[in-house]
Image: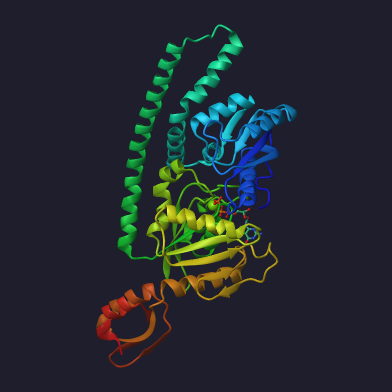
Amino acid sequence: MEEKNQTAQPVRKVLLAALKQNQKQNLDYELEELSNLARANRLEPVETFIQSLERPNPATYFGKGKVEELRIAVNTYETDLIVTNDELSPSQIRNLEKATQATVVDRTGLILDIFAKRAQTKVAKLQVQLARLEYQLPRLRTSMSVSLDQQTGAGGAGFTSRGAGETKLEQSRRRLTSEMVAIKKELAALQKDSQTQGKKRQESAIPTVALVGYTNAGKSTLMNQFLVRFGQGAESDQSKQVFEKDMLFATLNTTIRQLTLPDKSKFLLSDTVGFVSKLPHHLVAAFESTLQEAATADLLLQVVDISDEHYADMMKTTEETLARLGIKDKPMITVYNKADKADMAFPMLDGDAAITISARDRKSQDALLELIESRLFADRKKVTLAIPFADSAVTANILDEHELLAQEFNESGSLITVKLSSEEIARYRQYIQ
Ligand SMILES: Nc1nc2c(ncn2[C@@H]2O[C@H](COP(=O)(O)OP(=O)(O)OP(=O)(O)O)[C@@H](O)[C@H]2O)c(=O)[nH]1
Ligand SMILES: [Mg+2]
């Protein structure tokens, strides 16, 4: 995995710490991912600590020796921040902080912070906030104790009695809970609108295709390339494009656009949030409706950055995340992207379920579209219809939606050759030659 988000200079040094709990675990990949997540938060990893331990220490997560090593490293590197590879329990964070005299942020906290930074739309902001509050609620005591310590250190007068602290904690809990209720309400209202849109779409019977895959694979880039060429008028203009950037989690909202191909075939394409391994439970829950776009799609395009040495792990991550969302056995095309960067030939078709491309290459786009069409409209057959002049409205209807392959006239009407689905063939049976 290359370093992402290189434009922002790191501002704070950080130690990475991980447990290796079994042989199968691909810790290399997890740690590269973790350092990319850290960098996306403008943190600079200075050293990585790994401990082989089948079960985490219930109190401090790491064993005694490793905790001591971390404490010493905090001093040596003059840093005050440790990032852990897994989600820790609230008490493990608290104990580890006490033992190392540093702030401990777990992988979940890191991902939540990135999402919070990136959220642009109202829905995305609310979803992230909800996930953060869910995560914070059981951890309130930790942040409380930190802020209490700071108060004491700063003024000396902030010596709060235990009783008063508890009350404050309860107050904070209540505030968080009521904020969560309010956010859920607002999200439900906003999502009702989008569900009505979803229903309309289903009724329109235009097939839907969803881009899914690991973050930074090139999903939004592909979406934009297709929009420029096949979007509806205004949608090909720059301002209607989706955000693409070399950073983790550039996209946090779902965009759905209609594409009309030169042969008049139409489908809806959706672009959505990318995946990373161990996507926090609360984020998956909060983003469920956003992520569900993939669940209702007729076809998934799994975009993979083939130039990344860890691409196979990233595919596994994508498949695991889809399974967590209850999405399995969906028709899928694996789109191996960034072939230009990997020095591979493109476009290169591999059966009807995989293709190697470079997103900005026109030939790649054409080859991918042809594959999408062959999958979406597999049941289309070339037929010739004899339509009497009196029924010219039928001809117009058909030609609105289909490419005219041939046309002839005889004394009673026109003969048109088009490709129709089996459902359309049944509908126009009376005209078919
Ligand atoms: N060399 C090369 N770079 C590409 C290609 N496709 C995308 N990129 C770059 O990869 C980076 C990420 O692209 P995005 O389209 O934002 O990726 P994404 O999958 O939408 O990422 P998230 O929204 O974070 O999930 C951008 O800098 C793109 O310019 C490609 O085919 N070749
Ligand atoms: Mg994107």
Q: Residue at x 41, y 53 (%)?
A: 325
User: Residue 374: percent from the left, percent from the top?
Assistant: 46, 75
Percent across and percent down for residue 119 are 50, 41
Q: Nearer the viewer, residue 90 or 243?
A: 90
- In the rendered image, the quadrant that contains the C terminus is bottom left
Residue toward you, 356 or 319? 319
List the single residue furthest toward the top.
Answer: 157
User: Picture coordinates of residue 314 (x, y %)?
Assistant: 57, 56
In the drawing, does residue 162 fall left or right of residue 344? Answer: left
Q: Can you tell which quarter of the image residue 174 is in?
A: top left
* Residue at x-position 68% and y-position 69%: 344
Asked if 47 appears above or below 207 in the picture, the reply is: above
Front residue of 344/281: it is: 281
- Residue under the image location 54 percent in, 19 percent down: 147
**What scheme was used to colour the molecule?**
rainbow
> Can you say whether 422 is above or below 295 in the image?
below
Q: Is residue 141 visible?
A: yes
Report ligand 1 position as a quadrant.
bottom right
User: Where does residue 369 sit, x and y in percent of width and height?
Assistant: 51, 70
